Image: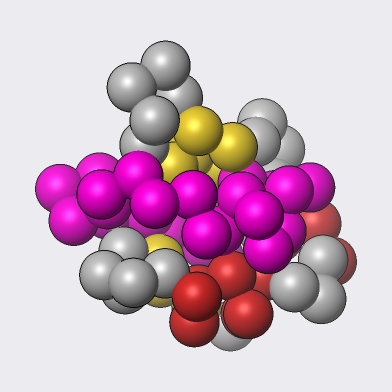
Amino acid sequence: MKISIDGDVCIGSGQCVLTAPGVFTQDDDGFSELLPGRADGGGDPMVREAARACPVQAISLED
């Protein structure tokens, strides 16, 4: 799986971080980013839920 975050769309709600903290974090400005080495989701079963929880659909997943 490949995870992408559209930085132009992200509003920094943090829902992804709350849902899958082992994959997502927030930068100094509060916008979401992937933790180093987690661009593939790291096998975290909550990645799909984190993408669904994003209120602006800034997270995309490719299998």
Quadrant (top left/top right/bottom left/bottom right) for the N terminus: bottom right
Residue 3 at x, y = what percent?
Answer: 52, 62
Task: Specify whether 14 is left or right of 49.
Answer: left
Residue 62 visible in the snapshot = yes
Find the magenta span and give its range.
1-24
Q: Is residue 23 magenta?
A: yes
Task: Specify whether 35 is left or right of 62.
Answer: right
Residue 41 at x, y = what percent?
Answer: 70, 60
Residue visible at 79% across and 47% down in the picture: 22
Q: Is residue 37 above or below residue 56?
A: above
Task: Specify whether 3 is left or right of 57.
Answer: right
Nearer to me, 35 or 10: 10
Residue visible at 35% across and 44% down in the picture: 12
Residue visible at 68% across and 63% down in the picture: 19
Quadrant (top left/top right/bottom left/bottom right) for the C terminus: bottom right
| Residue 54 sits in quarter | bottom left
Q: Is residue 24 above or below residue 27?
A: below
Residue 61 at x, y = what percent?
Answer: 49, 75
Instruction: Please identify the residue farthest to the left as the structure is shown.
Output: 8
Residue visible at 50% across and 33% down in the picture: 26
Q: Is residue 16 magenta?
A: yes
Instruction: Please identify the residue farthest to the top as the structure is shown.
Output: 28
Residue 5 at x, y = what percent?
Answer: 38, 54
Q: Is residue 50 above or below residue 63?
A: above
Nearer to me, 9 or 30: 30
- Count of marks overlaid on the render: 0
Residue 1 visible in the snapshot = no
Specify the color scheme: secondary structure
